[in-house]
Image (cartoon, rainbow, N blue to C red):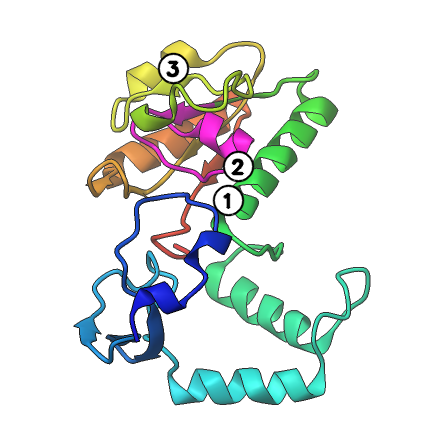
């Protein structure tokens, strides 16, 4: 069987893809439609960090699928309550907000920061982000990103995201103004080339934001909680 047997035309082109169609995965391995095996070093951009179809995960999903699926966030459900409890105990945070993707998590953080600015900082809405940052592909998270490839796409961008330089506290201070409500960063910039924020920079940034009454948002989609 070749890839021409699949209705590839039905999928919108979002990037240039190789002709392989993957049909099965196990651990760190993938098999394509021709039966060829590949060592997967991408892992779904870190989504499949537990590997492909681990039995313990497949069994848990199957059990839950037979019990209850998506009763709506308008109601409480037992698995989400238990997971939220585990996450708060392990992370030290007070509450969690579940989303479907990293971009939605960052979008939610942006909304919460602007809501905070409206309530407590006289309508402040600007969030300082960083050159080289990548926060997602929604319109707001693309605007928050400092990725050069995004600059000419989908104009006009959402306003309110002045850019500072990673590990340069003075550049952050220069961008703080009366409409600033938060600073947002990745502890390790991924798409910029795996560039870590130093421990000293993050500590100084936490001190600066606390002194100025600003929120500090950490995008840990890739790095994990803490």
Question: Label 1 belongs to which residue?
Answer: 103
Q: Quadrant of residue 204?
A: top left
Quarter placement of the C terminus: bottom left
Q: Position of residue 94 (x, y in %)?
A: 60, 55
**At x 34% / y 33%, what residue is drawn?**
133
In primary-sequence order, the first of circles 2 and 3 is: 2
**At x 81% / y 60%, what residue is drawn?**
74
In primary-sequence order, the first of circles 3 and 1 is: 1
Relative to residue 138, is residue 2 depicted above or below?
A: below
From mark 3 to mark 1, how far is it between C-alphas? 26 Å
Relative to residue 111, is residue 42 depicted above or below?
A: below
From mark 2 to mark 1, how far is it between C-alphas? 6 Å
Packing grade of label 2 (10 A; few <14, some 14-19, many >=20) is few
Q: Which mark is residue 138?
A: 2
Q: Which mark is residue 42?
A: none
Most extreme residue toward the right is 74
Image: magenta residue range: 128-147
Relative to residue 79, is residue 62 depicted above or below?
A: below
Is residue 147 visible to the viewer in this orientation of the structure? no
Question: Label 3 belongs to which residue?
Answer: 173
Left or right of residue 141: residue 166 = left
């Amino acid at each position: 069987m070749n890839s021409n047997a699949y209705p590839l035309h039905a999928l919108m082109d979002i990037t240039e893809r190789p002709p392989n169609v993957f049909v099965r995965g196990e651990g760190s391995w993938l098999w394509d439609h021709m039966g060829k095996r590949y060592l997967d070093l991408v892992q779904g951009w870190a989504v499949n960090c537990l590997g492909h179809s681990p039995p313990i995960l497949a069994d848990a999903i199957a059990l839950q699928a037979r019990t209850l699926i998506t009763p709506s966030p308008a109601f409480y459900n037992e698995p989400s309550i238990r997971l939220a409890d585990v996450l708060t105990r392990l992370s030290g945070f007070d509450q969690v907000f579940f989303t479907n993707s990293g971009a939605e998590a960052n979008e939610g953080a942006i909304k919460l920061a602007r809501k905070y600015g409206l309530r407590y900082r006289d309508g402040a809405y600007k969030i300082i982000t960083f050159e080289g940052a990548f926060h997602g592909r929604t319109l707001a998270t693309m605007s928050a990103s400092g990725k050069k490839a995004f600059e000419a796409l989908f104009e006009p961008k959402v306003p309110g995201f002045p850019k500072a330089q990673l590990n340069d506290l003075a550049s952050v201070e220069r961008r703080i103004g009366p409409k600033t409500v938060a600073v947002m960063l990745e502890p390790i910039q991924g798409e910029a080339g795996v560039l870590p924020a130093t421990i000293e920079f993050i500590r100084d940034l936490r001190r600066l934001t606390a002194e100025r009454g600003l929120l500090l948002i950490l995008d840990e989609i890739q790095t994990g909680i803490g």
